[in-house]
Image (spheres, helix red, strand yellow):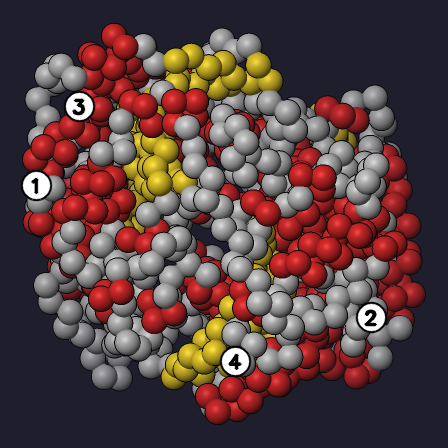
Amino acid sequence: MKKVLTLSAIALAVLAGCNSTPTQQSVKASLVPDTLVVSPNDKRAYQTLKLANEIEIILVSDPSVEKSAAALSVGVGLLHDPMTQQGMAHYLEHMLFLGTERYPDTKEYSEFMTKNGGAHNAYTWLDITNYMFKVNNDAYDNALDRFADFFKAPKLYPEYTDKEKNAVNAEWSMRREMDFFGQFKLSRNLMGDHPANRFLIGNLETLGDKENSSLHQETVDFYNQYYSSNIMKVAMISNLPLAEMETLAKKYFSNIENKKIEKPTVTQTLDLSKVAGKRVFYKPNEDVKQLKLDFTIENNQADYAVKPNRFIAYLLSSEMPGTPAQILRDKGWVSQLTSSAAPDMYGNYGSLSIDLELTDQGMANRDEIVAIVMQYIELIRTQGIDDKYFDEIRTSLNNQFTFLEKGDEFGYVSNLADSMQKYPLNNVINAGYYYAKFDAQAVTEVLNQLTPAALKIWYISQQEQTDSQLHFYDGEYRLADLTADEITSWQQPAKVAMNLPAVNRMLPEDFAIKTLPGAATTPEVVFDQSGVKIWQVASEQFAHQPKGLLKVYLNSDLADSGAKAQVLYSIWADLYNLQQSALSTEASIAGMNLGLSASNGLVLTINGFTDKQSELLTQGLAALNVAVDQQGFAQAIDRFSRSVANQGKQFPFYQAFDEFNNLISNNSYSNEVLISTAQSLTVADLNAFINQTFKRNQIRSFVFGNYDQQDVSRIAKQLQALLPAGHQISAYSKDKAWLPRTGEVYVVKKDIDVADVAIVDVVIHPQAGYKQKARARILQSHFRTVAFDKLRTEEQLAYAVGGFARPIDEFAGLGLYIQTPVKGPKDMQARFDAFKTEYVAELNKVTKETFEQLKNATLVGLKEQPKNLGDELSPLLGDWYRENFAFDSRAQLIAEVEKVTLEDIKTFYKETMGNSEAARINVQMRGTKFKETDFATIKGAVEIKDLAELKQHMKYQQ
Ligand SMILES: [Zn+2]
């Protein structure tokens, strides 16, 4: 599961043009600082060093952390796979976790991590393989010993070599239906014999023994060739002083072998006339309507300090009056326009793209949209290379960096080890924020590459006519050359008047701290009058940050009236966010966020720097009463319907969890009901509903961070002004969770439109309360590790598989989940059933000592201090929504965890998994590949055919 999340995060990062970007050539040396640059807000101690074997290391000492972490990246990746074993770099990454010389047991590493509150993972991308872990401080030394041995003496057992390719195959099976991977593959297909044109993930067809190629031998060879200390980078963080960390770093990393290899790079040039100058008609799996202008550019990572890509993308994606985003949205053609660059997307080449989400009207005018964007690029070329935009971007980045917040240790070392492969050491922390000077020449160089010859225009929708099918991925396409006429038409004057963006008015100027000494650190009601109630709390840990979060919750019991209300709140929020995108984009450049979401009414969220929030709130509230015409409404219904339908294209195990969540909540509806409800609505319905909501609601507001009494008074006034004459205060509406009762068992069996099978199987403890939740919490870490080891490492049934504890409001549940490409639902459920019994023996093997470690790890996790404002806020908000105004749910859980004994978790297991009378929910999703196989029969279960019917007699917790 962890691995799933990471790789898709990488994929998304690439999609979003993530700003971490590697160097190819020499960076302009004069712009590189002499020492490591850290945020003035960062009080941790840093040290950089290079060991005798040439490993570069960053040490971060932070006495406040409860967990220590390390990451090691190797400067080799998928681009260097042997063509005889495509997927090798990724596959080797999997293999390193399965035993080393000093720790030969394949399970040892994950068991060690579980007992010590650890987490571990790795990812492989085109030019990097990155490994990371975090663990309780007292286990850091031992964890490093295990971790470092991966890079000295991995076992690479032949028998596991053969097994683990199935996990890689299962991973490929999951991702083959993801449209991002299909489109990325097609782009690379066009690159001919460039090294980027290869498979990447690997599967059973590419990984295995062939004539003249043994998988095991090639794995060993790849490791021996590339795993050399001189292309490795390490980042470490712990509570230890720097001197002790240095000793640890030397102890564990200085004896990794230096093979003195050249850092693998790609230098092969592309013939753009073959790669681009094309229109790509692409038929995706999801029902989307997209247009993308995708320019192939040279990798200019080395220009990170002068940021030409960022400068251009900033102008392209501006929402100010006269820009394409504003013009096309006003025409009702486009709901979203973004621009980003990924300069290392293909190794020595990258991409700068403009991505548009279209409406049906936009679909009918795609050629004109392309022309407008191309003409705007010309406008940038002739008038846009102006240092006033540099000033604006630099101010925005500077503000972010000056008040940079800490993150989780695991993510931090992982990012550092990644950046160390890409930027000069002294810039690895600030590379994304560092804008050294205005460099018109660098901008011009990139603009000069944004030509028709370097352009692919993607028409992406299910309506495209196609004539070819991708290999190894699900996606159909057709290619056509851009015509000379079309290209000439872009050189004509634009049909619409366009201009470059005006200056941003929202950049903060005042960073004063308003929090009073001794301010309340538990939220308190500071205003309560005629339907408006405000809770306020200052930050306990980060009171020096000039930032804050403000929630305005327009809660209404109209939300309880059924699917129609739920759809209307979603449509309302969607229209609001669309209409306010100019404002929210301007705010985000200024370091603030504005957004509206639907949840038993509407939640308006504003956060970031507090200086100009008052202005943002005024504008944000004024726009709440959205106005929409017939066309805009129909487009919103279309977006809503497609987004619901696209849930059926997600990973099967995600879909299975969605079904589970739908089943246990009182206020949820099947996708079919949501779509048919949406299709039946009119503009008049929305307008009437907006009126009703303003008349009948209660407003709750949560104010957290850098606000004073004056701010609160002003907010109160603004909120009161929202309420019309004749306002009625409605009861607080919140979702209720299923009340599980003995013997109550539900099963969902569903055929889905993707290949694999998924099962989620949850058994609920009969007794409500923190006592059982505490037991589940400790048990789950062990249960999950054993499930992963048996079902994945040993039996290779899946890539995504595991055990988990899942509270259903006051009740504790324990469950198993899987997404498998190798078994139908009946066989898979039979394996789950057998596992549940086998696990008893594993649980009985747990010693007192191991139990104390598991319990300690759980406590360390629960008591961990927040790293940033968001961490501090999240448990408070959770309690606030649930109306636990003592804000003590975490404290109560901790108190119960302290009391749990080894016998207790055994009893808990017996009373859930071992209890045939316990309430249970079982979800089976049958993929297309297994249509001919049977669903599993669950004894005594009620099969859910109609969710709405079930909800009528289901009992809910109050
Ligand atoms: Zn993997």
Q: Which numbered tag is attached to residue 51? A: 4
Q: Alpha-carbon distance for marks 4 and 3?
A: 53 Å
Q: Nearer the viewer, mark 2 or mark 1?
A: 2
Q: Alpha-carbon distance for marks 1 and 4?
A: 50 Å
Residue holding disc 1: 502
Within 10 Å of the Cα at label 4, are there few (<14), some (14-19), or many (20+) other Cα atoms?
Answer: some
Front-most of residues 341 and 221: 221
Q: Alpha-carbon distance for marks 2 and 3?
A: 62 Å
Secondary-structure class at tag 3: helix
Q: Are marks 4 and 2 in contact (CB under 8 Å)?
A: no
Q: Position of residue 171 (x, y in %)?
A: 68, 42
- Horizontal side of 692 relative to 417 (left or right) equals left
Q: Nearer the viewer, mark 4 or mark 3?
A: 4
Secondary-structure class at tag 4: loop
Within 10 Å of the Cα at label 3, are there few (<14), some (14-19), or many (20+) other Cα atoms?
Answer: many
Residue holding disc 3: 375
